[in-house]
Amino acid sequence: MKYLITILTIAAFTSILLGFFLEVDYAQKLIGFGGVTGLFLVVFPIFSYYRWKDKDPKDYMLTKENLEKMNASQRDKKS
């Protein structure tokens, strides 16, 4: 999965750079494809899934229990 994300990111940036430097009629389409479609609709969701697949989102939410844990750890650091 890591290699797929790397390859797609390189392909998206290559498309953007080719759009800037090539003097062709479809240069703006290359930039748009690389930026919007490539990075934001393909690479970012795959990357997000890859990074969060084994984690519990409740650990990162500000619930009452997590706030109490943070307060307790701050009290421990002060003493």
Image: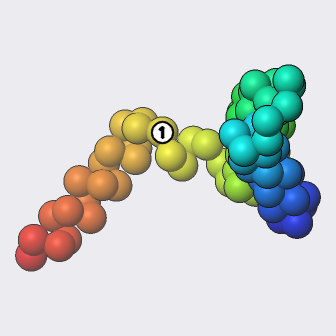
> Residue drawn 40% across and 47% down?
66
* Residue 39 seen anywhere in this rendered image of the structure: no
On the image, the x and y values in percent for residue 52 come to 70, 50
Instruction: Say which quarter of the image contains residue 2.
Output: bottom right
Which kind of residue does numbered mark 1 sit on?
Met
Asked whether 35 or 76 is in front, the reply is 35
Q: Is residue 33 above or below residue 43?
A: above
On the image, the x and y values in percent for residue 22 come to 79, 41
Asked whether 37 or 43 is in front, the reply is 37
Asked whether 42 or 15 is in front, the reply is 15
> Residue drawn 32% across and 45% down?
67
Q: Residue furthest left?
A: 79
On the image, the x and y values in percent for residue 49 come to 78, 46
Instruction: Say which quarter of the image contains residue 45.
Output: top right
Quadrant holding the N terminus: bottom right
> Residue drawn 20% across and 62% down?
74
Q: Is residue 61 left or right of residue 57?
A: left
Q: Is residue 78 above or below residue 53?
A: below
* Residue 63 seen anywhere in this rendered image of the structure: yes
Q: Is residue 51 left or right of residue 64?
A: right
Mark 1 residue element: loop
Instruction: Say which quarter of the image contains residue 46.
Output: top right
Quadrant holding the C terminus: bottom left
What colour scheme does the image use? rainbow
On the image, the x and y values in percent for residue 25 come to 85, 23
> Residue drawn 42% across and 36% down?
63
Neighbour tally class for label 1: few under 14, some 14-19, many 20 plus, Cα within 10 Å:
few
**How many numbered circles does the render carry?**
1
* Residue beneath disc 1: 61
